[in-house]
Amino acid sequence: MVKKHFENNDVVPKISFIGYDNLAKNQDPFAGMKFDYIISLGLSSQPNKELIVKELKKMLANNGALLEDSKIGNTHPQKFACHMLIDGNFVTEAGNFLDDK
């Protein structure tokens, strides 16, 4: 999965967080939207998904980024579109957030 350090503040990467089930089925819940990275947090199988989402929103907000709950799909409501506006953040598939300032 993506582990990238954004060194140029002028670059605004768009990161989409989607459930693992959609990746496995090769579906695109963000059809028509252009994203630089796709990250699966496997939220549907995570017993602590509410905590993961809360921590992710907090980390991004603390660093000037925005996480929007896009509520795409009926069977998997935990899908998120993230427009990351900052550099220096690392997000891993397991839901570990590094460099949380």
Image: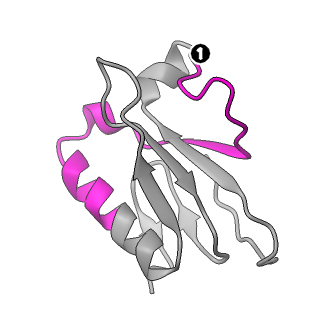
Identify the colour scheme used. one colour
Task: Identify which residue, 62 or 20, lies in the foreground.
Answer: 62
Q: In which quarter of the image is residue 62?
A: bottom left
Residue 91 x, y percent position in the rendering: 52, 60
> In the image, what residue occupies the spot 60% across and 63% down?
84
Q: Quadrant of the C terminus?
A: bottom left
Residue 96 x, y percent position in the rendering: 41, 62
> In the image, what residue occupies the spot 48% across and 73% down?
98
Return the residue found at the far left: 47
Residue 44 in the magenta stretch? The answer is: yes
Q: Quadrant of residue 100?
A: bottom left
Up the image or down, 42 lies above or below 48; here it is above
Residue 1 x, y percent position in the rendering: 61, 46
Up the image or down, 93 lies above or below 67; here it is above
Give the left or right position of residue 6, taking residue 23 as reference.
right
Up the image or down, 95 lies above or below 5; here it is above
> In the image, what residue occupies the spot 35% across and 72% down?
58
Q: What stretch is highlighted in magenta?
A: 28-55
Give the left or right position of residue 52, taking residue 17 as reference.
left
Crowding near pointer 1: few (<14 within 10 Å), some, many (20+)? few
Up the image or down, 44 lies above or below 92; here it is above
**What kind of element bears circle 1?**
loop
Residue 40 in the magenta stretch? The answer is: yes
Give the left or right position of residue 13, taking residue 28 as reference.
right
Exactly how many numbered labels are in the figure? 1
Of the residues shown, which amino acid type is indicated by label 1? Asn
Which residue was labeled with disc 1? 26
> In the image, what residue occupies the spot 59% across and 15% down?
26
Task: Identify which residue, 48 or 66, lies in the foreground.
Answer: 66
